[in-house]
Image: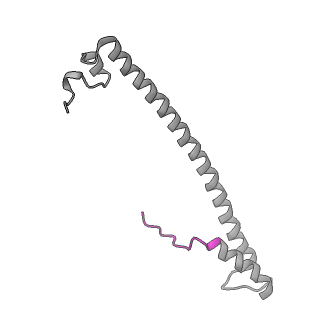
Amino acid sequence: MVDRFRSPANTADQATNIDQAWPQIGESVVLGGVAREGFQGGMTTLQTAEESLAAAEAVLTDARNQRKAARHELWELVKRVRSGAKAQFGDDSNEYELVGGTRLSERRRS
């Protein structure tokens, strides 16, 4: 995906520097058709978007951690079922193969 909104990563830092310098130029001075209040509004909009993104990333991280834990728990069950089928029916049985095991007679010899 091409980013059609190109801007430097340090845009917020640059904006902060401008906002701090603006009073020295003059509070009511309009620069490039932009009043200071409008400029600060843009800064607030970016800050709100960044906070929203950080919250969403925290939720996503939590969801990924839950998925990882659930996958691990299920993998432990998969191994137990396969081991149980191997113990109950043998490692060359059709039942062991049905639960995803490789039958002894089908394993490669080294």
Check if residue 107 falls in the magenta segment.
no
* Left or right, residue 10 beside residue 74: right
**Residue 26 shows in the view:** no
Question: Which residue lies most toward the front here?
Answer: 110
Give coordinates of residue 76: x percent, y percent.
45, 27
> Residue 50's image quarter?
bottom right
* Left or right, residue 72 beside residue 18: left
Q: Residue at x 76, y 79 (%)?
A: 20
Q: Residue at x 43, y 66 (%)?
A: 2
Check if residue 9 falls in the magenta segment.
yes
> Residue 94's image quarter?
top left
Give coordinates of residue 95: x percent, y percent.
28, 16
What is the number of callouts on the image? 0
Q: Residue at x 57, y 70 (%)?
A: 9
Q: In the image, which residues are magenta? A: 1-12
* Left or right, residue 100 beside residue 34: left
* Left or right, residue 102 beside residue 43: left
